[in-house]
Amino acid sequence: MVSPWHARRHARLSATVVAIALAAASPGGCTSSGPTQASLSAGLQAGAIREAECYKLDMAQHAWAAIAATCQRAATNPHATTGDFAVANYHIGRARNELKDFAESAAALDLALAMPGVQKDLRRRILLTSGKARLGLRDFPAAIEALNGALVLGPNDLETTMQLGDAHLGIGRSDLAERDFEKVVALAAADVGQQVRIAAVAETRLGAIAISAGGTDGLERAARHYEAARKLDADNVDAWLGGGAASVQLAGLRSGAEAQALYEQAANAYRHAMRLAPAAVDAQTGMGAALFGLGRPGEAVEYYARAVELAPTSAPRRLDLARALRRAGRLAEAERTYDQVNRLEASARSLFETADVQIAIGANERARESLMAAQKLDPAFSGAFLGLGKLLFSEGPQHFPAARDQFREADRLTRSGDNTMRAEALYFLSRIETEGGGKDARLAVSYAEEAIALDPGPPQYRAQACLVRIRFLSKDDVRRPSGAGPCTVSDDSAGSHLLSGMYHLRAAHFAIGDDRKRNWESAYLAFSAGQQKVETSAEAERRILRERLAFGEGLALYCVGFADVGRQATSQASTDVRAYFDTFHVARCEAY
């Protein structure tokens, strides 16, 4: 049984230790804002037990391992009171949290919380640190419980509210996280001073939530949040990186001068991020994406290569470079880089993308090996079926039936997931119906339109929708006042003008009188305009586009009455070009 004298003595010692602890546990934690060395020495000389050692000013130097060890000794002192024990374990937990030893941190903090009579502000700090430890352990429900407990004791604490937002993000409740981060911004606005930096961080979190929402509205909101973050803290790297990402994605939804301005804006943001953090890999890859948008693929690839230099063992960064090389048309280099990716960290998707490049350069056997390796890694990976279908498709119409089976399986496997991959499978199914001698116009149109609905970006999907319309055009279609639909020139590219010219030649088959002549003249103008744009096309496409446009122009000239000039132009066309026009019933002036 403890005597009254011992009880009073322990109470006095507890008060001394707790007072020192609470001074050290000021908003900056155990930092130089705690007691001075002189005051601490005075406390020790006054008879404080050696629990006070764990509040020495070496904590101001962030010597976390030493702090944890010293406080552990204090916690195990047989003369320690419950108050001493709680305070010591709080500091153990805090130190362990800083050392990323989250499980040990949580265990120490649980011991501290179990002690009776813990002072209110100390309990709030214990709960806050416990929430941080649980975040480190990715135990988000436990983190939310601890942080909500801390907010009951301190409702307007910015740090606790910020951590709670991160915990809500962890469980996928972006609505609650958004509420928390908006509260941080509002609290900081009411008490500017030192709070602007944490408000800037909250704005970057709100920007990330808005980006994940997708769509124009989400991206525009994200851009506003990142701009607000930069105004609060011009040195916040995430604000510049996020602003760049929002601008790049918005540019992808725009066209012409507006898109170019957004890409320039993104490039400026990434330059600023690189000045603040030269080793930031995301700044390098972001700049690469912006430069691709600005039509500077050579410079773009250099930034992706720089990202690999900064993170040489990172398979994702090397995968970014491989994709950039592929996009720049440097296919041999892309294949070599994909091989490096697959040696570092092969995945079904990286092997599928490798096969795509190999098909493009005609290395079909290597492509088949890559796709079989992808299927071995993941038998249910839709990309393996899509890739095998593309490989068969590239080998000619005699392989279309086998390719169709592969594309249908890819379509089935992606119905609840990857819209991009499913759209590509549907695109090829439409091409098989259109180019393989099929007669099911309804199915060909349905595949093409669904591909565009799933992924409106790729221009080849719109092109296929136009070619389907040309291939299956009828007299009734021409007489309906529906216009050229997907065959309307939308982007002033050589390919778009080629399709427009083909549509008008095909429509002329069913028109009569002046309408037929107008269609021939429109076809001639479209083919001529296309030839003016060939040099702006991707290098790999220029030769075939040039040949098809020249042949189309010759057909149009022949039809409008310049038979000799037209015959001379068409006589120079290759068998492949003639077959292409004939596939879509655009090979002569008479109606079929």
Image (spheres, helix red, strand yellow):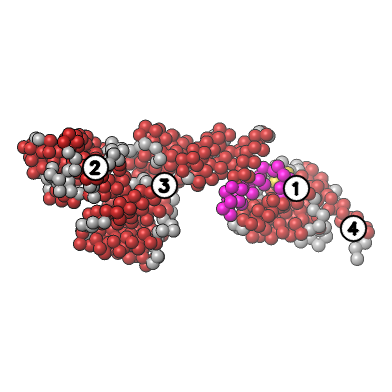
Q: Earlier in the sequence, mark 1 or mark 4?
A: 4
Q: Amino acid at mark 3?
A: Ala
Residue 283, placed above or below residue 2: above
Q: Amino acid at mark 4?
A: Ala
Instruction: Mark 1: give few (<14), some (14-19) or many (20+) Cα within 10 Å.
Output: some
Q: Quadrant of residue 353?
A: bottom left
* Residue on which the image places disc 4: 7
Q: Which residues are magenta?
A: 150-176
Q: Amino acid at mark 1?
A: Leu
Q: Distance from label 3 to label 4 (Cα)?
A: 64 Å
Q: Distance from label 4 to label 2 (Cα)?
A: 101 Å
* Residue 153 tag number: 1
* Residue 307 tag number: 3
| Spot occupied by residue 355 in the image (x, y as percentages of width and height) | 31, 58
Q: Nearer the viewer, residue 346 or 518?
A: 518
* Residue on which the image places disc 2: 478
Q: Distance from label 3 to label 1 (Cα)?
A: 46 Å
Can residue 242 be seen here? The reply is no
Q: Nearer the viewer, residue 355 or 495?
A: 495
Q: Residue at x 55, y 35 (%)?
A: 228
Q: Distance from label 1 to label 2 (Cα)?
A: 74 Å
Q: Amino acid at mark 2?
A: Val
